[in-house]
Amino acid sequence: ICDEGELTLEVDTEGEISWYDAEDADEPAGTNSTFDTGLLTETTSFWLEVFQSTDGAEVQVGEGTDTTNATGSPFYHSWGGYKYQYIFTAEELLASGMMEGDISGLAFDITQEATVDYNDFTIYMGTTEQDAATSTHQEGLTLVYTEDVLATPVGITEYAFDQDFAWDGESNIVVQISWSNVNYGNYSAAALATTHTTSPNRTTYTYADNRSAEEILATMTGGVNGSGYTPTTSRRPNI
């Protein structure tokens, strides 16, 4: 309009709509597909935000094609048991297409099946302010998946969570994988999965021989009752 007057703004889209009358406004001035500006007497700006849910959508983080049998791969079996904590930054998650909401599962791309099963397999999830791994695991994670005896068939193997994990769309996420066969390991028997590397290191892991999954889970740094250690690595699986 060239003089003072009122306008009705309209948007044709799906999703939750929020109109704002200031760029840094906390509360929307309107939430419908149409928005009445009220009387305008000067050049005025309005801001529109549309939130579109990704319920049921699948996204992938990590485009690596490396299948090296090495630490960082969740099924590496040079020692008898492992616990991995993988950090995925909010920036990475958003770039993959993820949006705020519930995470109902994850998957690994397995390229070679193990000749052994993985016992007492668990997945925990949590959030963190860290964007790099240290030699100490992070606490306060939530158990989302358990499997007493896990097989590793070739293909995109999905693990549907026993309970969804709510992501706020802003925090970095920690994915913890743990299992133990309470033996001395079996390098050649391990399953292979596609992985990639990160800089900085975003994987903390604990390894030990002849220690139960419970003992490994309880270890936050160092060795597991006299066996193994807790270092970091740059390798992380595609999920």
Image: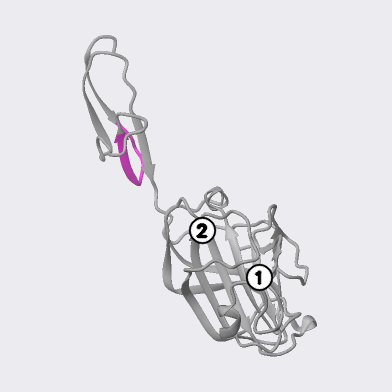
141 over 121 or under it: above or below:
above
Q: Quadrant of the N terminus?
A: top left
Callout 2 touching callout 1 (CB < 8 Å): no
Q: Amino acid at mark 1?
A: Tyr
Q: Amino acid at mark 2?
A: Thr
- Quickly name the residue at label 2: 128
Residue 43 placement, left or right of 100: left
Instruction: Kindly identify the residue that appears in the image at 36 percent across and 41 percent down.
Output: 13
Instruction: Kindly identify the residue that appears in the image at 37 percent across and 38 percent down.
Output: 49
- Between residues 65 and 118, which one lies in front from this camera angle? 118
Residue 207 placement, left or right of 102: right
Around disc 1, counting alpha carbons within 10 Å, would you say few (fewer than 14), some (14 to 19), or many (20 or more)?
A: many
Picture coordinates of residue 219, whole percent (x, y): 59, 77
- Between residues 30 and 141, which one lies in front from this camera angle? 141
149 over 48 or under it: above or below:
below
| 20 in magenta | no
- Quickly name the residue at label 1: 205
146 over 41 or under it: above or below:
below
Using the image, tell me which numbered label, if any, was put on residue 188: none
Instruction: Kindly identify the residue that appears in the image at 69 percent across and 70 percent down.
Output: 73
Q: Which residues are the magenta region? A: 10-19
Q: CA distance from mark 2 to mark 1?
A: 16 Å
Instruction: Kindly identify the residue that appears in the image at 62 percent across and 55 percent down.
Output: 132
Picture coordinates of residue 214, whole percent (x, y): 56, 85
SS at badge 1: strand
| Quarter where residue 209 is shown | bottom right
